[in-house]
Image (cartoon, coloured by chain):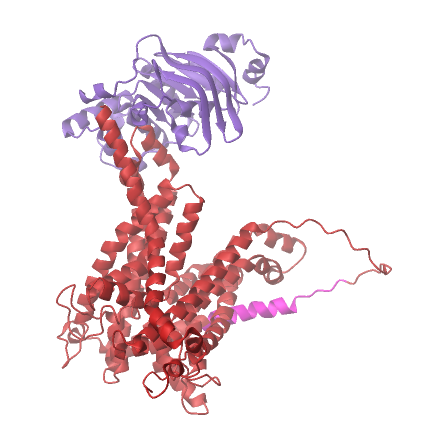
Chain colours: A red, B purple
Amino acid sequence: MRDAHTSGRKRETAAKAVFGFAAAFSVFAVFAIIFYIFYAALPAFREIGVFHFLFGKLWAPDKEFLAVSERFGILPMIVGTLCVTAGAVLVGGGIGIFSAVFLVAFCPKKLRAPLSHLIHFLAAIPSIIYGFFGLAVLLPVLDKLSPTGSGMGVLACSLILGLMILPTVTGIAKDSLEAVPSAYFEGALSLGASREQAMFGTVLPAAKSGVLTALILGTGRAVGETMAALMVAGNAAAFPTGLFSNLRTLTINMVLEMAYASPGSLHRNALIATGAVLLVFILALNGILGLLRHKKRERKIRPDRPPTPAKSQKPFSEPVFKKRGGLPRTLKYLSAVLSGVVLLALALIVGFILIKGLPAISPAFLFGPSGNAAASLRPAFVTTGLLILTALAVALPIGIGAAIYLSEYAKQNSRIVKVIRLFTETLSGMPSIIFGFFGVIFFCELLGLGRSVLAGGLTLSLIILPTVIRAAEESLLAVGDSLREASLALGAGRLRTIFYVVLPSAVSGIVTAVILGIGRIVGESAALIYTAGAVMYTPQGLLSEGAGFAVMMWKFSGEGLYLDYAYATAATLLLFVAILQALVALCKRGLTRGKRA
Amino acid sequence: MKRQNGWDMFAFEGETAVTIESLDLYYGSFHALKNICMAMPKHAVTALIGPSGCGKSTLLKTLNRLNDLIDGCRITGSVRIGARDIYAKEVDVSALRKNVGMVFQKPNPFPMSVFDNIAYGPRTFGVRKKAELSGLVENSLKAANLWAELKDRLHKSALSLSGGQQQRLCIARALAVQPKILLMDEPTSALDPISTGKIEELCGELKEAVTIVMVTHNMQQAARISDKTGFFLLGDLVEFGDTGELFASPKQEATMNYISGRFG
């Protein structure tokens, strides 16, 4: 019996170590990404010089008659990135915050749930579809407005990116508005303020830090967005001079030229160095977020200042009370109108793509042969299936293990939990293209997997890991402690309690995590082009190249020949995303119903 | 149940089931139990009464070391089950909890079938054979007066039972690992009067086989079913004695005030 008991203890200790390792994995992943990107960028920084690279005004890698320090300057792209990010935050941030206010305060109750679902749906639409929408719908309109006859450039890019970051902003702003104690709202009303005065004058200022967080996360998404920007920016490596002037962002530079930069060349290293600069931007934004959160926690009530003696006391005269509130009322209508604009945009995207795309879907298009002579989605089905299997095989065990550590072993709100959460958030905030470059450097080259479905799947596993951890942890924490106590009180160990009582109760959360992960994989493009490849034929196994739906769509839309195919692929992708979203909603409903019973 | 012999580390001869000597318990800097001394006799129901926050549930959880889960919980003094100090280093907490079962305030069946709920404990301790498990499930349900109601619903979800049935299921689940002591933390406070009556009746029957320690808010309940009663106030054990005596002629004024309803 002695032995049974010590071996049981050993097993418990070993399990704790395994879960702890899984939890630390995102920390390793973040460090590995930063390390390898900077390490691979180092030769470029050394050869070109950091100053010349960052502040050089000319990007012309093939003008070999120029000195190295003169032809690799990314200042135009830094400026371009800043320009469109500012534009996107102006468009998406503004509309996003107003529609959050509308959802929380002014929206009729019956519409609230469907509207929230639509905003979620907007967030789940893959970036390649936004880009394609911009290319096919927005640009022709802008072409007519533009003095040069071409609508590509700053305005188009800002509008599309703004639309893309909108759901992020709305979602987080909505959460923080809802978290404001209702006493604030009621207090304002009790003083005679109208609903809109209370909302804009009291509740919104109280949710300031949450709204700021929403804007910063949106900024991060805009800075790192690749495929959508690529399709509408015009891509010339020059300084933007006006709303319709072409530009190139850092991300566009990376994805555009990687295809013809030969391995080991200075050109390629300079592209990776572009990635390193992008990474610095993203990490800086993360740092600001961290500071914001820190400040919020540390804020203390300031000691009262001694009252300043009034210099000249005016004699008190009877005040005149007036009914006011013109501005808040205007803002209220504005929030309703802007929410309507969001719906309109969503309807346009979905309607346009379904109307043009659905008729082009045929059995031959879905499952027919594909290669250089003909094109079909068959390779995309096979590739996506393999990518999902690989990515889930890695991300699920690690993600669930990490969630178990965070909810069952670590003390809530302890330092270690905070660190792991910080790194998981950092990982989830990294742009796809950074994952793609890391995948090329680490999985394809260092591990020798080459450009393959396996390398793509492993890259994707890092991308979906934060989603899996978060969804699994949420559902584990939702399991009542009374069940854990009941199991422990029967003499069961921690492991048995976790695997037989806690995890089975958390199944719907884990299913949600899987579906969210699949959604991300189905629509991913920037991380896959250089890790899994962009070929038209069906992969023969994990070690051959293959393209998923989004990458296929990029190829179709880029080559002009297959524009119908691009519409059809977009429609297929949209349908997938809609189905997955519906499944997630069902899972969540099941979760809440289970809790009530 | 041959296997069970190995878990019999608590020498259980003698008349006393639980001996507590100068027990102090702290949650961080909060002194939750102050110098508690008491001896709970075997095959009896010991009731712990007192106003909310007086430490009675805390004391219950020191008996199966469920307090170990709480950060910053510190204990001095000794708690013996049978002859063994359960806070000694070499004690296997799992074996302790097998011997000291617990029923909680709110019924907490696992989201599994009735059968799997009851078989959970035995399975934890290595019982795998279907026949053995079926026997244990049947005996436990019978002991909890549930067999007649549930014998045709063994494979239905335990969450579909009524509140009273769920609580008796939790008692059956605790009995399935054949504990020597059963801790009950206000087991009827979430139940209707009829279910409460059934559980009180059950306690009377069960004390033939196990020693029961029960926390209750309900003084009539303590008077009805317990043999010994301890009255707690702000972490102190004010008075401890035979139930009849304590309710008829309390020695302390605080006890008197409490049982006559003057506060609490």
Q: Visible in this render: residue B233? A: yes
Q: How many marks?
A: 0
Pick the front one: A573 or A104: A573
Where does residue A69 sit, x and y in percent of width and height?
39, 80
Pick the front one: B139 or A9: A9
Q: Is residue A98 magenta?
A: no
Residue A570 location, quadrant: bottom left
Where does residue A385 sit, x and y in percent of width and height?
20, 63
Residue at point 28% right, 69% down? A573
Viewed as shown, does residue A526 lie left or right of B256? left
Viewed as shown, does residue A565 lie left or right of A481? left
Residue B124 location, quadrant: top left
Where does residue B148 sit, x and y in percent of width and height?
25, 25
Residue at point 14% right, 77% down? A371
Majority secondary structure of the magenta segment?
helix
Q: Is residue A583 above or below residue B69?
A: below
Q: Visible in this render: residue B217? A: no
Quadrant containing the C terminus of chain A is top left
Where does residue A15 sit, x and y in percent of width and height?
28, 40
Viewed as shown, does residue B180 lie left or right of A164? left
Residues rendered magenta in the picture: A321-341
Residue at point 27% right, 52% down? A396
Pick the front one: B164 or A209: A209
